[in-house]
Image (spheres, grey):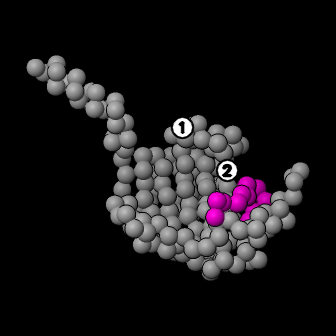
Amino acid sequence: MKLAVWGVALGAMLMCPRAFALGGEHAPGQPVSCSLWPAGLADVVNSTNRVYGYFLNADDYFFFSGGSAALNRFLAKCSSLEGTPVTVVLQSGPGKVAKFHEKEPSVVYDWKLSTLNRAEHRDEPGVQGRPGLGKYVLMVEVHVGGRIPLRDLKVPGNVELKAGQAATAEVSSYILKQRPKGE
């Protein structure tokens, strides 16, 4: 009988591998750190304008609110983290996210930082092929147009710049001007 119970339990685990994910929220103002992060990332993450955050397994996602000056300082700090490649993805329109256990988006944000563990995302394009020796790749999704006018955005030269799915022709034109082909 015990063997049959263990067989059913093992079968259920194999059929539902995502059921064993570990996740939770990072409240605004709650200090967050990880011993595996590159030096300085905790300072970036714990800025006073963080409005929400959550973790899922080895990845953390943080949401920030602020204008162009705050974002430009944020990007400069991210780009200076040693061995940690950064990609900025430009989106048009406001950013909204649902809290960890909610269905409807309730948190409005201007940019999102994803700290992606290379080991967890080894098959995803844009993660493994990025230069850098660190264990993490940073993705910053920026919502332009509202509190962040595109004309005020200053993306450091060592940061990869991409258009997101919700990007307008204006965003695509901005990227071409910032990163002409051949660079």
Nearest the viewer among 53 and 2 is 2
Stretch in magenta: 155-166
Kind of residue sitting beneath label 2: Pro
Indicate whether 94 appears above or below 90.
below
- Where disc 1 sits, the SS reads loop
Residue 150 position, x and y percent, is 73, 74
Q: What label does residue 85 carry, if any?
A: 2
Indicate whether 76 appears above or below 126.
below
Indicate whether 24 appears above or below 57.
below
Q: Is residue 132 visible?
A: no
Which mark is first along the chain, 1 or 2? 2
Crowding around mark 2 (Cα neighbors within 10 Å: few <14, some 14 to 19, many 20+) is many
- Distance from Cα at disc 2 to Cα at disc 1: 15 Å
Q: Is residue 69 visible?
A: yes
Q: Which residue is denoted by mark 1 in the rendering?
A: 119
Kind of residue sitting beneath label 1: Ala
The image quarter containing residue 94 is: bottom right
Q: What label does residue 133 carry, if any?
A: none
Is 85 inside the magenta-drawn segment?
no
